[in-house]
Image (cartoon, grey):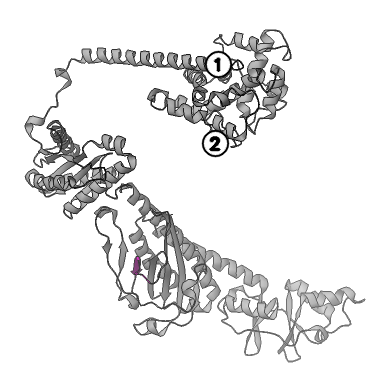
Amino acid sequence: MSESGNCHAEIASVGHRDSVKEAATRMFSHNVGCLIVTDDRGTFIGLVTERDISRHVAVSPDNGGGVKVAQIMTDHVVSASPGITTGEARKIMTEHRIRHLPIVDNGTVVGILSVRDIMGQQLLEDRAAAEEVAMLSKCLKSIDLAEAVEIVAAESPKLFDATNCVLCLYPQGDRSRDPELISSNRCPCVGGKRGHSTLSPEDGPTDAEQTKKVECPLFLPQGVEDVSSEDGYYDADIPAECRGPGGQPPRLVLPLDIVGLPEASGQEKRLSGYLCMCGLAPSNAANRELTLYKAKLTREIVIAHLTNATRYQQARLTSLTDPLTGVGSRRLHEDKLHEEADRAKRYKRPFAVAIIDLDHFKMINDVLGHAVGDEAIRKLADSVRREKRGPDILSRYGGDEFVLLLPETKAADALILLERVRSKAQQICFDQGMALSVSCGIAESLPETDEAPGDVMRRADLALYEAKNAGRNCVKEWNQGMNRLVSNGELEIERIKRLQRRVMGLSEKAEKVFMESIWSLVQALEAKDPFARKHSENVVAYAVGIARTMELGPKYVDLIHRSAMLHDIGKIGIPDAVLFKPGHLTPHERRIVEQHPMIAVRILEKMSFLENEIAIVRHHHEKWNGQGYPDGLARTAIPLGARIVAVADTFDALTSTRAYHESRTVAETMHLLKDACGYDFDLTVVVAMAAWVEDVARRLETTLDGLTTDDLLATIETKDTIPLPELADVVLGGTPDAP
């Protein structure tokens, strides 16, 4: 047999007239699991195993000395011929449920295969197969999808010594459509051609897809087309349709299912098909199990790599495409501009750049709404796309700006094209009677100079500003008179710096005046409620105390201070009948009150310098378990400042008298806050609150039960930070670990 090295080199035998005891002695001395039984002439007549012998030795009083081997041997022995493969031997042993398989040549036993031999050989074969298939992974280094497909089609047949190979993938697995990707090494079914149909980012996302359709009359076995979960399908024959062009049996079919990223439609990109190899070497047919094992590993590697390549291509196309208009993105423009600038320098050929700006775009958004503004941008992009030439590259450069990169074009020729674009834009109207207009600036490259790619963009930008200064709705070509660039030596730098400092001072003063005005509104609002007087002031004090205890730093403490001042400003929009209701609120009234964080956001959102404070005010009623409002944030998704203000807000509410409850002591309130850790509040913040409260009690030489809110409020003026000691064990009955 081919794996004869795995058979027992020494064949241990015993005569059929020998006793079981003698057989046991011989088996032990040779360290084997079975013995060949021969007749008086030495001819093989049977087999006796260790299990047969041990059973009789154990029950016989003379250790099997009185029992002949002929009485216990197996005379109907299943055997095999030399040259049997491991897979065939395993199949015979499994089918007959035997643990030893004699190898017989012309009636003579030349070896014995055991289950242990088979398992060892299988392990070696599997390991060798895995190492061989792993080499395919090293070949698949390309992240270009079309190139990766070609590498798979070229390298996979080498693993199986296959003559022909074809890889075919259909969009969304629809085999009624043309393949999106197809590649072959020498498959006669596709004429030995390679082709692919896929969008090429280098050609720009606005150009037509580069398609090379290849007829692939590949006929799969019945049922394989719909089985995408199979690791591989081995077929000893091939269909007549494949045999006719020159296909050779046997063949191996690996179903492939590539799942990419979600596309604009929201549906995941999916490529399904197969990798088919035919003309496999005879060794593959002889050991089908090993072949299928290699096929499974190959399929996993191919799917993993093609999936990565597909997703990379999608991500790259996304980064090169503007999602609103479908034209190129700013990144695409910058890539193509550098390529065109290099080409222009090398061949001394011109190119032009045109910047197209939609006039009065802010007014369109403000008057007609952002949805109409988006529609205006889309319609303008479509209009320019129809007017441009095939090689021209259109990109969206900013919110209302587009750039046309015009290869092999002089500024005078670009002027004609842009005038046509401007004229077409004026024909875009909306139901409200508003028509679009655009301003355009054009600049031509200077290939004889050593200018950078960005220089032509700066000149086009100057021409655009000239068009806007000329009243908009016109096209201007750059000229030397537009060059307003000056050096720092020509500017009054000290005057500029002095004015900058003055403007900064005015800005800081404006912020201070705004905060003072808002604070006055908050105090006036709370003055109307006899139960809520000084609520925001108290929350500021408690929040600052917690923040300092957590050693958050002066700037963050100031942020907490301002946020706590503003946290209830939204209640100005709640009806007084609901806000000052003496009893419990109905569910509907509670929903009204829960709007106050969003009302605060609407009040403050125009103040850009309050961006961080607005986030804290918005989320100060979120809960650690995600059951709060308005957004249902949970755990650390809630801004830290909001978690601090939430604890301070609740502490003041519990320690103050309300229409629906009496005030609680500091000790009682801390106990309630501790119980709510992990549900309503962040444990770290409550630990900081407890540390601060305990520190104040210690400095005042009193107990927690004797501490009052006035004591806490009186100490907040100090700038000392309170370290976080091991107070969680004392105050909260646990360590300050996050729940």
Is 185 a magenta residue?
yes
Which residue appears at 56% of the width and 11% of the height? Answer: 720
Is 272 left, or right, of 42 in this rendering?
left
Which residue appears at 49% of the width and 76% of the height? Answer: 223
Q: Which residue type does callout 2 highlight?
A: Leu
> Can residue 132 be seen in this snapshot?
no
Is 632 a magenta residue?
no
- Counting from the top left corner in percent of width and height, residue 687 is at 64, 24
> Can residue 237 be seen in this snapshot?
yes
Q: Which residue is mark 1?
A: 528
Magenta segment's dominant SS is loop
Q: Which residue is mark 2?
A: 633
Q: Residues within 10 Å of mark 1 (few under 14, many from 20)?
A: few
Mark 2 vs mark 1: which is more N-terminal? Answer: 1
Is 350 left, or right, of 257 in this rendering?
left
Q: Residues within 10 Å of mark 2 (few under 14, many from 20)?
A: some
> What residue span does the magenta drawing correspond to?
176-186
- Counting from the top left corner in percent of width and height, residue 573 is at 49, 26
